[in-house]
Image (cartoon, rainbow, N blue to C red):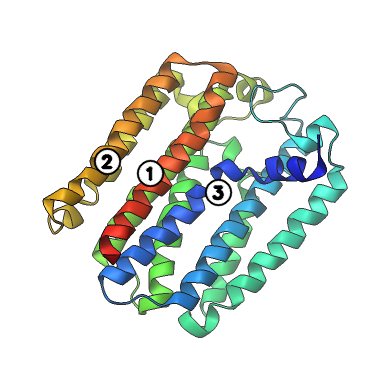
């Protein structure tokens, strides 16, 4: 396997639409409210993607260190577990990427103020704390809450803030929770697939705690709740724009059906499908707001 492909898999590119969707949604709302600013929006995009890659690298490294991953796992190949990447190399790259994310984040200080350093430190800590530290969130059923916060509430509200100077505007706050719930669904697919391995390794994800049947029901409900949270926007759009939530929900139900009827490696494509459905929804809604 080529080195480039190994690192691409380690970065888990199929899940990166999760971080992009939040920035896209915030930019669409900024345009709609007449607050859009291109330069800070670009920095937010770069920071969000880089921070997620840090989290993905850290997750692979620290899962390996804890012995959670094993060779021949059902999910996507883990380079460090399979011996394709040296553990020390992955650790160095993880922290180098974290430094890059911090540097990008500092570029937002002129747009949001020095207090954003505290926000950046908070994000950096939790990018690692998802899998590392004395109480890794993903091992104690808190991964879903972390995704809701760091892929929904924080990126959407703060991307909007550095463009507008307004934090937690009503439309934006509701949209941030909605995007967060869509992101949680990506994690549910991942943990649904890995439930048996996680249980054996002592990793108590939410799926391990509540079981696959309940987790699949949460997945389904999350999609409908997310769409409903945009109610203040649906009330103000032209009726033709309602095709956007319809498209999302049709794909959402389709993927949910694949989730409850599939098993093992059959579930791998559902990660990308769930994250892409989330991104497409955000892009279509942004396009409507721009036009």
Q: Marks 2 and 1: CB-CB under 8 Å? A: yes
Q: Which residue is mark 2?
A: 225
Q: Check disc 1 and report its element: helix, strand or loop.
A: helix
Q: Which residue is mark 3?
A: 16
Q: Earlier in the sequence, mark 3 or mark 1?
A: 3
Q: Residues within 10 Å of mark 1 (few under 14, many from 20)?
A: many
> Can residue 150 be seen here?
no
- Which of the image's four quarters has the C terminus? bottom left
Residue at 53% of width from left, 16% of height from top?
A: 263
Q: Is residue 231 shown above or below 12?
A: below
Q: Earlier in the sequence, mark 2 or mark 3?
A: 3
x and y, in percent, of residue 197 in the image: 64, 21
Left or right: residue 85 versus residue 234 is right
Q: Residues within 10 Å of mark 3 (few under 14, many from 20)?
A: many
Left or right: residue 68 versus residue 161 is right
Q: Which residue is mark 1?
A: 181
Q: Check disc 2 and report its element: helix, strand or loop.
A: helix
x and y, in percent, of residue 116 in the image: 52, 75
Residue at 51% of width from left, 25% of height from top?
A: 192
Left or right: residue 118 versus residue 132 is left
Q: Earlier in the sequence, mark 2 or mark 1?
A: 1
Q: Is residue 126 shown above or below 102?
A: above
Q: What's the CA distance linking mark 2 and mark 1?
A: 8 Å
x and y, in percent, of residue 27 in the image: 38, 66
- State which quadrant residue 68 falls in: top right
Q: What's the CA distance linking mark 3 and mark 1?
A: 16 Å
Residue at 58% of width from left, 39% of height from top?
A: 138
């Amino acid at each position: 396997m080529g080195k480039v492909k190994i690192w691409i898999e380690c970065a888990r590119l199929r899940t990166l639409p999760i971080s992009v969707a939040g920035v896209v949604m915030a930019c669409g709302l900024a345009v709609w409210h007449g607050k859009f600013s291109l330069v800070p929006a670009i920095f937010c995009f770069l920071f969000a993607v880089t921070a997620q890659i840090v989290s993905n690298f850290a997750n692979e490294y620290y899962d390996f260190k804890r012995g959670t991953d094993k060779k021949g796992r059902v999910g996507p190949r883990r380079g460090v577990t399979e011996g394709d990447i040296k553990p020390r190399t992955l650790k160095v790259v993880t922290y180098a990427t974290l430094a890059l994310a911090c540097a990008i984040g500092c570029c937002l200080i002129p747009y949001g103020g020095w207090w954003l350093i505290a926000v950046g430190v908070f994000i950096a800590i939790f990018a690692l704390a998802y899998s590392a530290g004395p109480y890794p969130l993903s091992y104690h059923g808190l991964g879903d809450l972390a995704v809701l916060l760091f892929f929904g509430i924080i990126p959407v509200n703060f991307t909007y803030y550095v463009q507008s100077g307004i934090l937690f505007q009503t439309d934006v706050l509701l949209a941030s929770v909605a995007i967060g719930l869509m992101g949680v669904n990506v994690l549910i697919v991942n943990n649904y697939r890995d439930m048996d391995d996680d249980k054996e390794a002592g990793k108590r994800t939410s799926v391990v705690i509540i079981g696959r049947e309940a987790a699949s029901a949460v997945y389904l409900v999350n999609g409908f709740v997310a769409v409903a949270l945009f109610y203040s926007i649906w009330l103000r759009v032209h009726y033709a724009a309602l095709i956007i939530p319809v498209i999302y929900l049709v794909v959402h139900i389709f993927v949910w059906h694949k989730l409850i009827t599939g098993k093992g490696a059959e579930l791998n494509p559902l990660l990308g499908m769930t994250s892409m459905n989330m991104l497409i929804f955000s892009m279509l809604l942004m396009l409507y707001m721009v036009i």
